[in-house]
Amino acid sequence: MTIIAFLEAQDNKLKKTAFETLTAARGAGSEHKVIGVLLNGTPEQMQEAAEYGLTECVNVTHDILNIFSPAAVASALAQVAESENADLVLLAATIHGKEVGPRLAVRLQAGYIPDAVALAISGSDVSATHPVYAGKARVSLKIETAKKVVSLRPNVFTAKKVDAPASPVARSFAPSLGTGDAKAPVSSVSRNTGKLDVAEAEIIVSGGRGLKGPEHFYLVEELASTLGAAVGASRAVVDAGWRPHSEQVGQTGKTVSPNLYVACGISGAVQHLAGMSSSRYILAVNKDKDAPIFQTADYGLVGDVFEILPKLTKKISETVQH
Amino acid sequence: MNILVGISQVPDTATKIVISADGKSIDTKGVKFILNPYDEFAIEEGLRLREKHGGSVTVVSIGADTAKEILRTGLAMGADKAVLVKGDAVDSFIVADNLSAIAKDISADIVILGRQSIDFDSFQVAPMVAEILGWPSVTFVSSLNVDGSAISAERDIEGGKESVTTSLPCVLSAQKGLNDPRYPKLPDIMKAKSKPIEERASSSAAPRVSVQSMELPAAKGKGKIFGDSDQDIAEVVRLLREEAKVI
């Protein structure tokens, strides 16, 4: 089988999810051919991807692709997939990936599995597992079409470097794109500067109603800063106006799967668990030992967040430094 | 302006999920079904566009007869027409294929959906409809302005917001914060009960994915829960570093 791994970049740098996608594609086994696809890629990007096992690369070059438009990216990827006779396209289920993947599937008349947390490739069969019902169940889907597209949930497939990176064999591909293909292009982007976003962080420290007021969030921020983590929030405190919606984790906020999720003063309503239960490790700090969050947590500290958080921050700061 | 709003019926968020005997779906016995929460933002935005630009709002759902309940909610909120496509909504491509066909039939100028339905959480129907129709799409829309046929919208991305400009016809998916959905008034709820709901057969598209199995997530081993002493805190930090290796 020929597998295309779409390597998504942002501000000219490959995203971490690109390496995860590449690693997942290589994980299918050496009997499959893996081709990495870059959009207006640079030699630096190819070199970086080579460390994660990129050996063959198609660099899609077109001016229209300098500005993100889901329709143009889907069209370009579909053209590469057809020209390489690819059987499977893998991409990351980032915000952009979630819009490109379904479009690409329609173009290729391919079955599509979104936001996969496990991928199984056997001969020409592709199936993948995807969380449903707010993470309360998992469905395993099999693609029934000849062409296949799967998007992978960020931070679930661990990116692995290879021992001896090779110089990738690269070729350019000029897709046929007109201005009519750049439907709904992005006109401007504003980023929350200086702040790590919950959707991309490896560690998240979140605060909930147990903090009793926005003025106490510095306890969460200090722990986050010690851990190099992003700050998250529960719906209750976002609705109360203590924190911005961009920090909200849960069903009506962001779905995250960091390596470590620290829940401070969060009881763990099912809507919150929907957004963070696929985290690799969960530490809960809460005064109520019966709070549902302790059912999901790997580690727990039962007690007053106002007493525990400063001590925890201090202890971690001492430990990490040594 | 002809506005098409696709809505779906989903289990209430607080539902305890039990897998049915076939191992491929959930047991719906005793499950309370609701209008997908994101679809409320979609309906509200459709109604506001009609109030500003004229035209009509059609709500459509793909599902069994029970989905009439949410279509009546849409009518009670103020939609002009409701369509039930009788079929199974498990394969998102079939849902998208049906919505696209109806969009063509009613000469829709805009199709609005919720950003995801909270049952299968697939985030895929809006971009699929757009691709089938050859239209632009903007997903996760948190702010929208339609001026003539020009559209400017803001969408949430990782770590910020993106502004997007495009034009009608267009497909949008609604994010929380786009608007505050209205509550239907009692007389409108009563009136909606007797409004007609058009029924259609599902398109003949073949499913592109099949469900192999559905299961509950593997139960986590029992967590290591401590008190609040200095020793407890030190032990948790040690475990984070030596056992979990995450700090």
Image: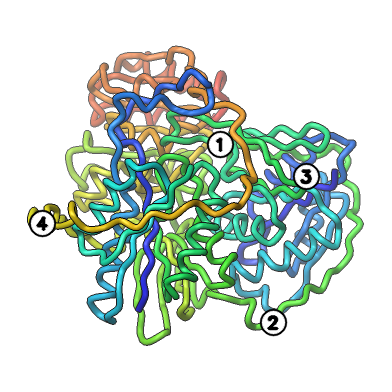
Residue type marked 3: Tyr
Say whether residue A16 is visible. no
Query: Same chain, marks 4 and 1?
Result: no
Q: Which residue is label 1 attached to?
A: A130
- Left or right, A137 with respect to B37, comes to right
Q: Which residue is label 2 attached to?
A: A178
Camera-side residue of B150 and A215: B150
The answer to whether mark 4 and mark 1 are in CB contact below 8 A is no
Question: Is B68 situated above or below A44?
Answer: above
Point out the frontmost of discs 2 and 3. 2
**Real-space Cα separation, disc 3 to disc 1, in angstroms:** 25 Å
Q: Position of residue A179 (x, y in %)?
A: 65, 83
The answer to whether mark 3 and mark 1 are in CB contact below 8 A is no
**Real-space Cα separation, disc 2 to disc 4, in angstroms:** 49 Å
Dot 1 crowding, Cα within 10 Å, few <14, some 14–19, many 20+ = many
**Real-space Cα separation, disc 4 to disc 3, in angstroms:** 58 Å
Earlier along the polypeptide chain: callout 2 or callout 1?
A: 1
Dot 3 crowding, Cα within 10 Å, few <14, some 14–19, many 20+ = many
Which SS class for mark 1?
strand
Mark 1 chain: A
Please report the residue visible at 72 percent of the width from the left and 58 percent of the height from the top.
Answer: A108
Q: Position of residue A277 (x, y in %)?
A: 44, 31
- Which numbered disc covers residue A52? 3
Point out the frontmost of discs 4 and 3. 4
Q: Which residue is label 4 attached to?
A: B185
Please report the residue visible at 45 percent of the width from the left and 69 percent of the height from the top.
Answer: A190
Query: Same chain, marks 2 and 3?
Result: yes
Camera-side residue of A229 and A146: A146
Which SS class for mark 3?
loop
Q: Position of residue A246 (x, y in %)?
A: 37, 54
